[in-house]
Image (tube, rainbow, N blue to C red):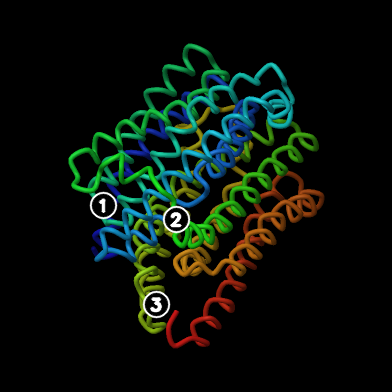
Amino acid sequence: MTLLRTSFLNGIAVIIKMLTLLGINKMLAIYVGPSGYAALGQFQNAVQMVTTFSTGAISNGVTKYTAEYKDDEDAQRRVWRTAGTIALIGSVVTSILIVCFSKPLAVWCFNDESLYSVFIWCAATVVFFSFNTLLLAILNGKKEISRYILANIGGSLLSLLVTIIMVVQYGLYGALISLVLYQSIAFFVTCLLCYRTPWFRFSNLLGRLDKQIAINLTKFTAMALTTAACVPVSHILVRNYLGSEFGWETAGYWEAMWRLSTAYLLLVTTTLGLYFLPKLSELVNPEDIRKEIVQGYKLILPVAMICGLVIYLMRDFIIGLLFTDAFSPMRDFFAWQMLGDTLKIASWILAYLMLGKAMVKMYIVTEVVFAFGFYLLTVVLTKVGGPIGVTWAHAVNYGVYLVVMYFLIYRKLNQNNAV
């Protein structure tokens, strides 16, 4: 499947997801306000870490090896059984730990011990999320794009339905619960879509661990756990800093800005994961890899740039449409946030090669440095420019990251006859 066709099909799912996000954002803006947005961001980052640890952080590895073993069904099944067993063990262990430490986690995330029960909900549902992630990784690796996209559409519609019901009934508490509920319910939608495929058997998803495959998957575990530990933690630190220095409403403005960036870049970021990761896993010749990267820049980067420009020009309309007047101070964040988003996509096109080729050391070092570099830049630049400094930090951080990626990746390609 070509990049253009993948982008088109993925675009259908993304449009539906973006439309659901419009409704969700408006509901949250009305019912929880800027400070509620900050709390949601804290919990969402915590859930990211939990779910990554519970799955063993192997979804990218499953996609890679499913694609790599496309002509060896027995090897594919060994990958899935090993991954499924790791995910089950990881889910059980993670759930127990969450229950044991639910109150300290509530204090860390919300500074409010009374919200510990949202982590109990998370513990109860994490196994479903883990296996939904595994099934999606298999669909991606097997390039069953139609099913993959339908699963994502189902997840988007579920997120809208569950969020509306929970927010209207329970306010902020309901919004927090909805974050874990809809992602877990999506597992059953994905199961229905996979049910009639020849490969879908529970015996293919659970069973004896293959030692060599487990070792191979740990390369991706190391990379994904680094991301799970660094990126959400750096964002939690940024929110805590903004909240303590400028008030939790300001932290909420930044969270709303970040959510908007995530929404409009969905087409780009999901296409990178859906097309680039399996494709780069298959390619061996450096020249073929270069051509694929150049094609990515020609098709993906202009989309990100145009979207960013349009959103900047329509920022006042967007704030009114997606949020409320209480969020109007975030208009000052748009220019530098859009620049940072464009630089992010430009760097990610290169960075996906690290995932596709399991460049473990390079990936871990750059993730740690730039995740916490963002926090440090935020502290420094907000002291100079006030709250807008957090978006300066975003742009500067990804500008430097792009330069570093260019030199590291192209040096790697020039050093090897086969990657």
Residue 100 relative to residue 193: left or right:
right
Question: What residue appears at the point 52 percent right and 18 percent down from the top-left corner?
Answer: 174
Q: Quadrant of the N terminus?
A: bottom left
Instruction: Indicate the amino acid at tag 3.
Output: Ile
Q: Position of residue 205 (x, y in %)?
A: 35, 44
- Name above or below for residue 350 compared with residue 335: below
Q: Give the residue furthest to the front.
A: 208
Q: Dot 2 lies on which element? A: helix
Query: Are the two marked residues, 2 and 3, in contact with CB atoms closer than 8 angstroms?
Result: no
225 vs 361: above or below: above
- Residue 145 has which mark? 1
Task: Note whether 267 is above or below 161 in the view shown.
Answer: below
Q: Residue at x 61, y 36 (%)?
A: 46
Q: Of the numbered discs in the image, which one, if any, rests on residue 60?
A: 2
Residues under numbered marks 2 and 1 in contact, where contact means CB atoms less than 8 Å apart: no
Which residue: 18% across, 40% down?
196
Work out whether residue 413 or residue 89 is closer to the camera in this orientation and state it.
89
Mark 2 and mark 1: Cα distance apart in space: 16 Å
Q: Report the mark closest to the observer, 2 or 1.
A: 2
Mark 1 touches mark 3? (CB < 8 Å): no
Q: Secondary structure at mark 3?
A: helix
Disc 3 residue crowd, few under 14, some 14–19, many 20+, Cα 10 Å: many
Q: Would you identify the image quadrant in which residue 21 lies?
A: top left
Q: Helix, strand, or loop for circle 1?
A: helix
Q: Crowdedness of circle 1 by 10 Å Cα count: few (<14), some, many (20+)?
A: some
